[in-house]
């Protein structure tokens, strides 16, 4: 397990910092206030791929020997270049259906029949690769969307999911449903495409939207009873700033007569605040999440709204439906700094003032209880001035703290779990001197078939591999699981690094995690892919399925917090810490209360002696100043009940 590093403060502007309360946030050193509004989020324009003369080069295949960590990579297919799917985590690239033992991987077409330098190459085709033997072999012949530059509508940035008719047990009768954006040869975007075809190569359907409906599509979801949902941006800009921020909600229903999906679209205007200069205080990317039965849905914006709990906080703005999208209601205002896990991670803007600043959701899912989960990095806002709310504090040595921010069963309630720290910073395209693509950590969530467990998977460089520029250049695959029913974490919340120390150490690019896991006899199999780029960004690439990314039921070793006598125990805050840190314990009855801190070897390093206390909330304080940097566990004991959680010491 890698350990947190000590980071020096680099302050680009003057602000007050309460050393006692905030000293745990030393890693979040400010490298300069960053503004998000002017940096419009759009995929890299890759029209050059249509004319590239490098298609005849052969990508180097990965080693076929089995990894020491039991990980093995199986070749899925090839694509024309590293832009074969959108360089973000919001697309549904991998999908699965456990009833059929079916896994799909959707990307632009493989290299077969591509003529170097020709506009008639098949890089505009969108291929739904699939496996029915747990990723051991892959069928690459299914191409639901097939349109090339010669036909004016080459497909770009595809997402793909599975439609399995009720009662069907034959893979060949199930269908691949894909969608994405079209691109003209002159690099202009020209509307969206929607396509479907059975895995038995029947009932191909291709539909295209009008050019003025152009949007980049995110969070494609397949629900029960043949319902499909995907969200896009319907934004406009003047070349520098957004002049309009809107979403387009695409909702589909399977038509048994035409054996295809009928799609309808709805334009929605987010309630973003507009400042006195006309700047729209909102992000240009949106999220869409649905329950498996298709009854509960959320569409999510990120920005500033006058109707928010804190009208100066850059935070989620969420609409919820409980009737399959027939009507939508804006969720009640909420102040996200009221969540201890988030508040303890923030810097002060000025003395006593902290405000959260939410990145775009990397992923969004709905659990079995109908609650929304947003996986994202939460930062610190750097200004409270009405005209500067789109600035946040950057980090000097790390990318930031990853959270699962989720709704609760209480009306309008929210909470958050700290997932892990992203150590290597995201690469901009300019940082990627070999391929010119750049990448984020691609944090994504996968659900177990019953919706009880969520697995968070991302790519990050081990601290030993992070070079002087602190960038995530040599990513490994990491994952950790959470049980939404019991509150248990896999291995007390310590992520598994599936590739460190093996033959794939530090070489796992453009990772994609599937929407659903397989579950068999207490083993949860995550569906994960990586891309191996070619010599340059224009060169062909290989896509690989990563086998044996598994968790077992026994990995979930935490204890249910709703145990006899113990109402709840908070995460220690601040966390990480290097000094005093506090744990709030709520007791439902009078109990003998004590606390023990142990290291990874199980050795006791700190203890608060037992004393009998009354029912209610009690604050326990740990002095971590004498502990070495690393991961520790604190166990709270109340009579015969105990709960263990993880804490990090800098």
Image (cartoon, grey):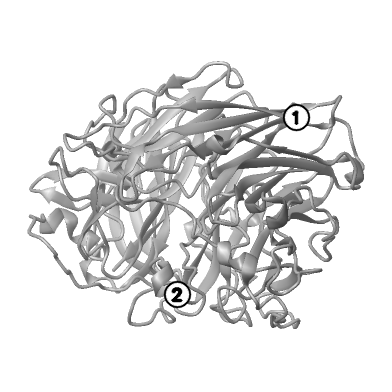
**Hey, which quadrant is residue 285 in on the image?**
top left
**Does residue 257 appear left or right of residue 290 in this picture?**
right
Residue 554 percent location from the top left of the image: 64, 56
* Residue nearer the viewer, 647 or 123: 123
SS under mark 2: loop
Q: CA distance from mark 1 to mark 2?
A: 41 Å
Residue 380 percent location from the top left of the image: 25, 51
Q: Of the residues tagged 1 and 2, which is closer to the observer?
A: 2
Q: Earlier in the sequence, mark 1 or mark 2?
A: 1
Residue 27 percent location from the top left of the image: 26, 66
Tell me whether the residue at label 1 lies in contact with that at label 2, contact meaning CB atoms closer than 8 angstroms: no
Residue with the mark numbered 1: 226
User: How busy is the neighbourhood of tag 1: few (under 14 within 10 Å), some, or many (20 plus)?
Assistant: many
Say if 15 sits above or below 368 in the image: below
Q: Residue at x 75, y 48 (%)?
A: 145
**Hey, which quadrant is residue 76 in on the image?**
bottom right
- Residue 613 visible in the shown view: no
* Residue nearer the viewer, 353 or 147: 147
Say if 254 sits above or below 41 in the image: above
How many marks the image carries: the answer is 2
- Residue 160 visible in the shown view: yes
Q: Residue at x 38, y 82 (%)?
A: 467
**Does residue 12 appear left or right of residue 237 in this picture?**
left
Residue with the mark numbered 2: 432
Residue 439 percent location from the top left of the image: 48, 65
């Amino acid at each position: 397990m890698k350990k947190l590093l000590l980071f020096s403060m680099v302050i680009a502007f003057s602000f007050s910092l309460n050393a006692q309360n905030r000293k745990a946030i030393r890693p979040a050193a400010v490298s300069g206030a960053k503004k998000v509004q002017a940096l419009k989020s759009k995929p890299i324009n890759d029209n050059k791929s249509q004319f590239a003369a490098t298609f005849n080069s052969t990508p180097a295949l990965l080693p076929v020997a089995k990894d020491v960590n039991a990980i093995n990579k199986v070749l899925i297919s090839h694509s024309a270049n590293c832009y074969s799917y959108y360089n973000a985590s919001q697309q549904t690239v991998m999908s699965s259906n456990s009833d059929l033992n079916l896994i799909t991987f959707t990307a632009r077409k493989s290299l077969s029949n591509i003529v170097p330098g020709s506009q008639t190459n098949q890089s505009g085709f969108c291929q739904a690769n699939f496996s029915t033997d747990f990723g051991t072999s892959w069928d690459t012949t299914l191409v639901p969307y097939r349109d090339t530059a010669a036909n004016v509508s080459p497909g770009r940035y595809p997402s793909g999911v599975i439609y399995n008719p009720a009662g069907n047990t034959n893979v060949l009768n199930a269908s691949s449903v894909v969608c994405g954006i079209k691109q003209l040869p002159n690099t202009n975007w020209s509307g969206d495409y929607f396509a479907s075809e059975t895995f038995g190569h029947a009932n191909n359907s291709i539909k295209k939207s009008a050019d003025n409906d152009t949007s980049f599509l995110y969070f494609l979801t397949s629900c029960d009873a043949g319902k499909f949902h995907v969200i896009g941006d319907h934004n406009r800009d003047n070349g520098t700033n957004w002049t309009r921020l809107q979403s387009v909600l695409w909702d589909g229903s399977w038509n048994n007569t035409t054996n295809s999906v009928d799609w309808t679209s709805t334009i929605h205007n987010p309630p973003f605040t507009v400042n006195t200069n006309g700047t729209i205080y909102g992000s240009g990317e949106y999220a869409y999440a649905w329950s498996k039965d298709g009854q509960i849905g959320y569409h999510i914006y990120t920005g500033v709204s006058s109707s928010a709990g804190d009208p100066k906080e850059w935070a989620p703005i969420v609409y919820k439906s409980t009737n399959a999208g027939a009507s939508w209601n804006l969720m009640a205002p909420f102040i996200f700094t009221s969540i201890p896990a988030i508040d303890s991670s923030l810097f002060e803007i000025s003395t006593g003032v902290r405000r959260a600043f939410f990145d775009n959701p990397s992923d969004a899912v709905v659990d079995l209880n109908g609650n929304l989960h947003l996986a994202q990095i939460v930062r610190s806002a750097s200004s409270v001035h009405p005209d500067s709310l789109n600035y946040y504090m950057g980090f000097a040595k790390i990318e930031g703290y990853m959270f699962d921010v989720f709704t609760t069963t209480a009306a309008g309630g929210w909470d958050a779990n700290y997932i892990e720290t992203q150590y290597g910073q995201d690469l901009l395209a300019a940082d990627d001197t070999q391929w010119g693509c750049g990448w984020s950590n691609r944090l994504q969530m996968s659900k177990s078939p019953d919706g009880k467990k969520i697995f968070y998977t991302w790519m990050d460089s081990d601290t030993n591999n992070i070079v002087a520029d602190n960038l995530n250049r040599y990513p490994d695959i990491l994952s950790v699981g959470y049980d939404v029913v019991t509150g248990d974490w896999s291995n007390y919340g310590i992520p598994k690094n599936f590739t460190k120390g093996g033959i794939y150490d530090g070489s796992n690019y453009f990772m994609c995690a599937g929407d659903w896991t397989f579950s068999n006899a207490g083993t949860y199999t995550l569906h994960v892919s990586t891309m191996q780029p070619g010599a340059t960004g224009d060169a062909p690439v290989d896509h690989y399925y990563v086998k044996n990314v598994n968790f077992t039921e026994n990995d979930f070793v935490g204890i249910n917090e709703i145990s006899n006598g113990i109402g709840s125990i908070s995460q220690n805050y601040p966390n990480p810490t290097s000094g005093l840190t506090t744990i709030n314990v709520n007791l439902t009855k009078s109990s003998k209360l004590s606390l023990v801190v142990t290291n990874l070897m199980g050795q006791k390093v700190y203890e608060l002696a037992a004393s009998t206390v009354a029912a209610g909330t009690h604050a326990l304080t740990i002095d971590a100043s004498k502990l070495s940097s690393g991961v520790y566990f604190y166990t709270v004991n109340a009579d015969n009940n105990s709960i263990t959680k993880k804490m990090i010491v800098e």
